[in-house]
Amino acid sequence: MRESFSVAIVGATGAVGGEFLRLFEQRKFPIRSLTLLASERSVGKELTFAGSSIKIQEAKPGAFAGVDVAFFSAGAARSKALVPDALAAGALVVDNSSAFRMDPTVPLIVPEVNPNTYTDANRLFAVGNCTAILLCTAINSLRSLGKMKRLIVSTYQSASGGGASMMRQLEDETRAIVNNATLPPTSLNQTYGFNLFSHNTAIGESGYNEEELKVIEETKKILGEPDLKINVTCVRVPILRAHTETVTIEFDGPAPSVEAAREVLLKAPGVTLVDDREANRFPTPLEASGKDEVLVGRIRQDLSNPNALCLMLSGDQLLKGAALNAVQIAELVLGI
């Protein structure tokens, strides 16, 4: 008989929490019992899983007794406060926040890229930044064609990266602008509807924001290439779901041909090639939304650099960029 597990979700009422519930059913994750945890204000509310209603409990110390696997998606502060308690209770923890990603003792796994970067002794696993996960999934197979020397990345990041509240903000602002109504209150210092702006994380002394620095450092860790040169510009765009990125890959020597890149990408795990020049059809966030795979296309030689190849990708931030990658990590580690 297949082993089943007692599972908990911390942040069950959030956008990623909802994806966990859907993925557990879709992928037939072997669950014996399911505990849904969130902040105190959500206690008593109910969510539906596998045809049954489950009441939300408070995410607090003591909530992990008997839990085999705990999925965290409630922000870094909550993870730092509660992950130690979950580990002490004996749970395997998959954390979707930034709290432990750069800890050298914590594996940062994208299963299609670096599935062997953990040992049986590891019980805490970090899920990478969504943009870094999508980037690494898209480009990993191209490393078989030559050593990568430098990445230049521009991102077009959707509201889903800011959670359910930012998605509602974009919807409400768009509706207000179309109807010539008063804009709703916002926690952003920008109007989001019909606008785009530099990613809404703090700017450091280097002039880079936190998101850009996360992508740089986490990509190096995931790929296992600490000396890889990476430059990133992260921009928030008025798209509800799925991030898009444009990437220039500079190789340590002549770039591989477009044909060779397409051939490799066609076979790459977690990737779907969308590269039809004649129809001008390439990856879009609308097409990527709801899909497990990262869409890759617009593959072309860099006309300014014979050693560089350019491409475009789109991927669902809530799925491969978050919940799906977390579930895949648990499946990998548990041998499911």
Image (spheres, helix red, strand yellow):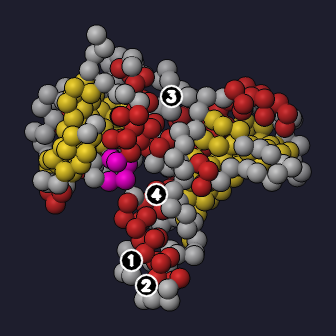
Name the residue type under label 2. Answer: Leu
Quadrant assignment for the N terminus: top left
What's the residue at 31%, 24% (across, down)? 30
What's the residue at 42%, 22% (across, down)? 332
- Mark linked to residue 160: 4
Considering only vertical position in the picture, is 52 above or below 278? above
- Stretch of the chain drawn in magenta: 14-18
Mark 4 nearby-residue class (10 Å; few <14, some 14–19, many ≥20): many
Mark 4 to mark 3 CA distance (whole Å): 22 Å
Secondary-structure class at tag 2: loop
Mark sitting earlier along the chain (3/2): 3
Q: Are marks 4 and 3 in contact (CB under 8 Å)?
A: no
Mark sitting earlier along the chain (3/1): 3
Residue that badge 1 annotates: 186
Secondary-structure class at tag 1: loop
Secondary-structure class at tag 4: helix
Residue that badge 3 annotates: 111
What's the residue at 59%, 48% (across, down)? 288
Considering only vertical position in the picture, is 176 above or below 308? below
Which SS does the magenta portion mostly show? helix
User: Residue 46 location, x and y as percent?
Assistant: 19, 51
Mark 2 to mark 1 CA distance (whole Å): 9 Å
**Closest to the observer, 310 or 104:** 310
User: Residue 236 location, x and y as percent?
Assistant: 55, 64
Q: Are marks 2 and 1 in contact (CB under 8 Å)?
A: yes
Residue that badge 2 annotates: 183
Mark 3 to mark 1 CA distance (whole Å): 37 Å
Occupied quadrant, residue 330: top left
Name the residue type under label 4. Answer: Ser
